[in-house]
Amino acid sequence: MTDKEFSLGIEQIRRGEKEGLRKIYDEYGAYIYKTFLSLVKSPQDAEDLTSDLFLRLWQRSEQFREGAGHKAYLARIAHNMAVDHLRAKGRLSFTLDDDEAAFDPPDTVRTDDTAESGISFDEAVSSLPEAEGEIVNMHIGMELTFKEIAEALRIPLGTVTWRYRSAIERLRKTVKGGSAV
C-alpha cells in the first residue's frame, strides 16, 4: 500500500466509511498481529492488541499527518501499545539504550537458507531478543527504512543499525546451525 492509498483510506475513515479501515486492515492486519506476537509472546494478547490498534486508528484518524510515512506511523502506534501492555503486566524485559554506533548494515539472511536449515524464518526471528526481532520485523516485514524505524521507536539511528546487524549475525548462526539462538 502506498502512502497515497493509505491517506485515502484515512480520509474514508474520517468520513465514517468502514471501507477505508478494511483496506488498511487487509494490508497490515497480519503484519501488525505478528509484530505484537513477537513482542508480547501471547496469541490472545496479540489478537487483542491488533484489534485495539485498528480501533485506535478509527478513533484517532485525525492524528495522522500525511508525509510522515504511514508505515512508520503504524509501527509507532504498535510499538507504543506493546510497551504499554508489557509495562502494565510487569513484563517489559528490554530497555532502549542510547548506543550511537553507526555503520553500514549487512545484507539480510536469505529465506531460502532458512528452508535448507529446517527452521522457518519466523521461528528464527522469534528466537531473537525482543528488541532485535522487532527491528527485523519492521525492516523486512513492513519494509521500513532504518531512519523510519528509529523515528517510530524513538531511538537513535545507530542503535537501530547496531541491533539489526546483531540480529542478522544471530540469524546467520541459527540458519547454519539449524537450531534456535
Image (cartoon, rainbow, N blue to C red):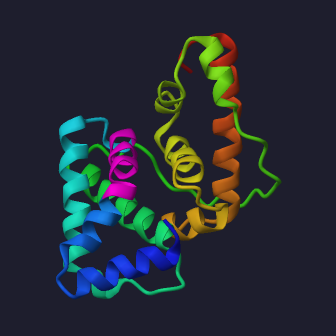
Q: Is residue 39 left or right of residue 145?
A: left
Left or right of 53 on screen, residue 141 = right
Quarter of the figure with the C terminus: top right
| Residue 35, visible in the rendered structure | yes
Q: Residue 166: horizontal and vertical position, in percent? A: 68, 39
> Residue at the spot x=43%, y=87% of the render?
65
Query: In the image, residue 94 lies at what x, y percent?
Result: 44, 46
Q: Residue at x 63, y 12 (%)?
A: 117
Q: Nearer the viewer, residue 127 or 86?
A: 127
**Percent x, y of residue 171:** 64, 28
Residue at 54% across, 17% down: 119
- Magenta span: predominant SS is helix
Q: Is residue 32 magenta?
A: yes
Residue range (magenta): 26-38
**What's the residue at 60%, 18% (across, down)?**
115
Judge left or right: residue 129 versus residue 82: right
Residue furthest right as drawn: 104
Kindly tell me whether residue 88 is visible in this rendering: no
